[in-house]
Image: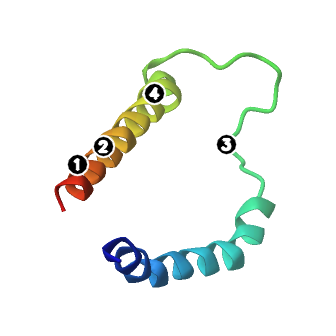
Amino acid sequence: MKKMAHIYRFLHVRLYALLTFIFLAGGIMGQTPTHYPTGKDPVQLNLVNILLFIVFPVLLVVIWIVVRRSGRKTEKEE
């Protein structure tokens, strides 16, 4: 029963996020970025590109795993 209460407590936040995505997705995906490279050359490996394409995605996955594990630990304690 506590799990259902937890789901319903955050349901409105998820609903707002879904509605925001639905209304903004067309405009966001319809825009063409002007700074995007158009050639078929591979991406240059400089510091900014390494951080942007390698370090930040790996860091986001690690943070996501840690948050999920901490959520499971608190769920088991309850």
Three-letter amino acid code of the residue under disc 2: Arg
In this view, the residue in front, 20 or 51, is 20
Marks 4 and 3 close (CB-CB < 8 Å): no
In this view, the residue in front, 4 or 13, is 4
Whichever of labels 4 and 3 marks the residue nearer the N terminus, that label is 3
Helix or strand or loop: what does disc 4 sit on? helix
- Between circles 2 and 3, the one closer to the viewer is 2
Mark 2 = which residue?
69
Q: Which mark is residue 53?
A: none
Residue at x 70% of width, y 75% of height: 22
Three-letter amino acid code of the residue under disc 3: His
Three-letter amino acid code of the residue under disc 1: Lys
Query: Which percent across, then down, holds residue 6?
Result: 35, 75
The answer to whether 74 is drawn above or below residue 49 in the figure is below
Mark 4 = which residue?
48
- Between circles 1 and 3, the one closer to the viewer is 1
Q: CA distance from mark 2 to mark 1?
A: 6 Å
Whichever of labels 2 and 3 marks the residue nearer the N terminus, that label is 3
Mark 1 = which residue?
73
Neighbor class of circle 4 (other Cα within 10 Å; few <14, some 14-19, many 20+) is few
- Between circles 2 and 4, the one closer to the viewer is 2
Q: Quadrant of residue 25?
A: bottom right
